[in-house]
Image: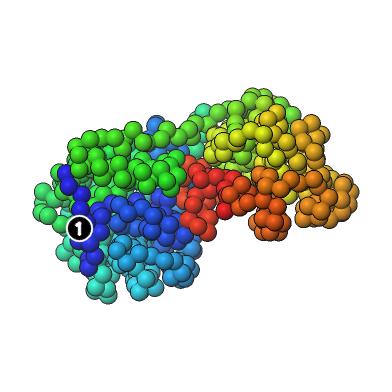
Amino acid sequence: MNINKIQIGDKKVFPFTIPSGIITTESSSIESIANKIEEIGILTTKSIGPESRKGNREPILAQYYPGCFINAVGLTNPGAKKFAENISKISFPKDKFLLASIFGKDTWEFVYVAQTLEDLVDGFELNLSCPHAKGYGMQLGQDLDIVYKITKMITSRTKKPVFAKLTPNVNNIVDIANSAINAGAYGITAINTVGPKYWSVDGNPILTNNVGGISGRGILPFGLSAIKDITQKLGNIPIIGMGGIASARDIKEYASAGASYFGVGSALAGMDEKEINIYFKTLVKDLQEDTNNAENLLKLVDMEYKKFKVADKIDLACNFKIIKTNNSLMSEPGQFIFAFIPGLGEKPFSILDDEPLALGVLERGDFTNKLNSLNKGDAIYIRGPYGKNIGMPSNLDITLVGGGCGLAGLYLFAKKLHEKNKITTLLAAKDKDHIPYLKEFEIYSKVYVATEDGSLGTKGLITDLFKKADIYSNCYFFNCGPKSMIDAVLPLELNISRSNVIYSSMDYMTRCGVGICGSCADKSGLRTCVEGPFMSY
């Protein structure tokens, strides 16, 4: 099967995209993927609505079988005006096609979003298929007349290609596709997720939405069946085919069914940007040479929840506790986990210690308040660990720099690297009660402490410790803390060492941990959950 650039609107592009809501959900990640991965010719945005939406609380994604996922993100987006502002600032290649996924609860909301983005994008994908947002998506896309009216209203106001994204959760998908085409749609996107469905752990629903859409390998037959039915009735129309695609074999089947372009989404779970690049290059080579090597590049991601119990709770301050569990979780320095409390949600935490698993919990809201109120013997669910192992060489001078709750992300570096390296640790917090594991840090490293109130160590900030500590030239730095702290120490560190051995972990909120949701993309477009969290800038 030859893979060449093909027409979409007034552009010729490679026929691959990543479906809406996966990886390229931030403008920075759209820019990065568009400029670095040649084979992805169509960049599909997350679904954008008229106003910002926070979406659902975490968990928003679970894996019920390897390569098979259930999700309920809840149409999280910044709103049309803010997204337009963000996308206007990126450098987007002229030989790529920017497809804006849009949604609304009625015709005029669709029109408003389309008009707001008209001058910034190459085409529109109408989300008529989201299965888990009340009043949107699938609830509109199941009605022939509504699909016609929305599509007609958009196509009458733009000359750019319009795709209608359809749900498989109907008995008349051919009629719905026909309604969209009759209303002027350029083509069809098929399919969105199957469902909504339910998944649980120990009888407790995992998703805070209780139910969600099914994606990944398990929905491959649904996608193929839908596209085959559509093309048999409507003939050769442009179709973006998606649903379970993971290999060249899958793409050939979608092409045989009638798809012109191909969306690869859930199969990219766990891959960093370089791995995605290699995957797509291999995929194209497979299609040209009739091989199937890209399938060997797929990653197994662990999203299983393991039941732990609280073994001890150390009250350091009124809002800061150390939760020790009854089991170990072998981890590498810098990795993190998700803690899950059924009915309340989940949040990511740095691993303070791994034998046994210990977390430093600073209270910030309902979840962390509840976590810190657990008693000995209470259950907590853990998934992970996530994040990259940096792979440190030996015989190095290493300086650990931590501020605030970032201190919890550094202890494993001291514990696991001290035997073959010389460790210096700089710790800072507002007072002595917010310095965890101080005695443990002192076992493995030379420690310098600063507190804002002077209750321990130097009175001042983390930057004041650079004047007192013995820091060696060209040492490795590991920074963990708020962005303001990292911004303050980086200039000092660059006077001492090289940028490629200075690693920082900033507080970008990851919601899935396996790279799918894209919410933790930094300003360069890299997703910190799979590229980091400790990254050299």
- Of residue 495 and residue 220, the one placed in the foreground of this image is 495
* Crowding at mark 1 (Cα within 10 Å: few <14, some 14-19, many 20+): some
- 280 sits to left or right of 491: left
What residue appears at the point 69 percent right and 41 percent down from the top-left corner? 398
Q: Residue furthest right?
A: 455
Instruction: Locate the N terminus by quadrant.
Output: top left
- 144 sits to left or right of 137: left
- Of residue 378 and residue 319, the one placed in the foreground of this image is 319
- 135 sits to left or right of 147: right
- Of residue 195 and residue 38, the one placed in the foreground of this image is 38
- Residue marked by disc 1: 6
State which quadrant residue 139 falls in: bottom left
The amino acid on which the numbered mark 1 sits, given as a three-letter code, is Ile
- Residue 527 seen anywhere in this rendered image of the structure: yes
State which quadrant residue 43 falls in: bottom left
Residue 219, percent from left and from top = 30, 39
Label 1, secondary structure: give it.
Answer: strand
State which quadrant residue 184 falls in: bottom left
- Judge whether 293 appears above or below 311 on screen: below
- Of residue 497 and residue 142, the one placed in the foreground of this image is 497
Residue 243, percent from left and from top = 29, 44
What residue appears at the point 43 percent right and 48 percent down from the top-left corner? 273
- Judge whether 452 appears above or below 394 on screen: below
What residue appears at the point 75 percent right and 41 percent down from the top-left corner? 424
Q: Residue furthest front?
A: 473
Residue 336, percent from left and from top = 59, 39
- Residue 373 seen anywhere in this rendered image of the structure: no
